[in-house]
Image (cartoon, grey):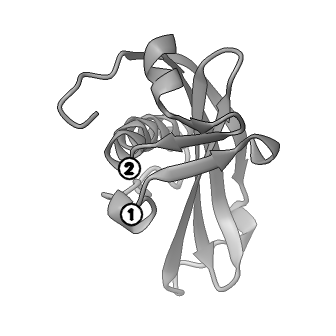
């Protein structure tokens, strides 16, 4: 699969959650940055969704929260090649990371747009090492999707 082109397209972008809580922000405290990523799939539509979450926090309370879903339609033949069994998909790590890169870039743009006319416009999404999140092939079981 590594030498083969994978046919896919961006099917949908959705902002799952956005919250800005300026009252929690304290410019004398260090800002902490938290991210998370998850992967889901839909057999019937040959879709893989990447969910990316980012939080900027002072102390323990976030003052910026954003979660974005990018849904990718995968060529049916390719999607079926990910099938390890009737109820298990195995998405190659390099492809999953590629979809995650697109999702993080999309999230970066959404964050920029949402903060652009606020006092928080200087908070940008930095580079994210997706190897930290997706080290191995992504295994999805049907009851977990």
Image quadrant holding the C terminus, namely top right
Instruction: Decide if residue 49 is on the left or right side of residue 125.
Output: right
Find numbered disc 2 in the image and state the secondary structure of the residue it sits on. Answer: helix
Question: Residue 104 sits in which quadrant?
Answer: top left
Q: Residue furthest right?
A: 143
Instruction: Classify 10 Å Cα crowding around label 1: few (below 14), some (14-19), many (20 and above).
Output: few
First reached walking from the N terminus: tag 1 or tag 2? 2
Across and down, in percent, residue 103 comes to: 46, 38
Callouts 1 and 2 close, C-beta under 8 Å: yes
Instruction: Decide if residue 15 is on the left or right side of residue 5.
Output: right
Across and down, in percent, residue 39 comes to: 60, 45
Compared to residue 101, the image places residue 38 above or below, namely below
Residue 75, visible in the rendered structure: no
Question: Residue 45 sits in which quadrant?
Answer: top right
Image quadrant holding the N terminus, namely top left
Q: Residue at x 61, y 35 (%)?
A: 69
121 or 75: nearer the viewer: 75
Q: Residue furthest left?
A: 3
Q: Which residue is mark 1?
A: 135
Q: Residue at x 40, y 55 (%)?
A: 122
Across and down, in percent, residue 7 comes to: 36, 16
Q: Residue at x 53, y 23 (%)?
A: 80
Instruction: Classify 10 Å Cα crowding around label 2: few (below 14), some (14-19), many (20 and above).
Output: some
Across and down, in percent, residue 78 comes to: 43, 21
Residue 131, visible in the rendered structure: yes
Q: Which residue is mark 2?
A: 93
Find numbered disc 1 in the image and state the secondary structure of the residue it sits on. Answer: loop
């Amino acid at each position: 699969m590594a030498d083969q082109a994978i046919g896919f397209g961006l099917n949908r972008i959705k902002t799952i959650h956005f919250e800005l809580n300026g009252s929690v922000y304290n410019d004398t405290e260090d800002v902490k940055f938290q991210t998370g990523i998850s992967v889901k799939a839909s057999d019937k539509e040959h879709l893989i969704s990447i969910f990316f979450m980012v939080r900027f926090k002072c102390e323990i309370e976030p003052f910026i929260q954003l979660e974005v879903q990018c849904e990718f339609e995968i060529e049916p033949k390719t999607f079926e090649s990910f099938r390890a069994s009737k109820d298990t998909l195995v998405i190659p790590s390099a492809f999953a990371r590629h979809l995650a890169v697109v999702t993080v870039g999309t999230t970066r743009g959404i964050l920029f747009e949402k903060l652009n006319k606020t006092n928080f416009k200087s908070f940008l999404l930095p580079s994210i090492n997706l190897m930290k999140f997706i080290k191995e092939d992504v295994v999805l079981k049907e009851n977990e999707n």
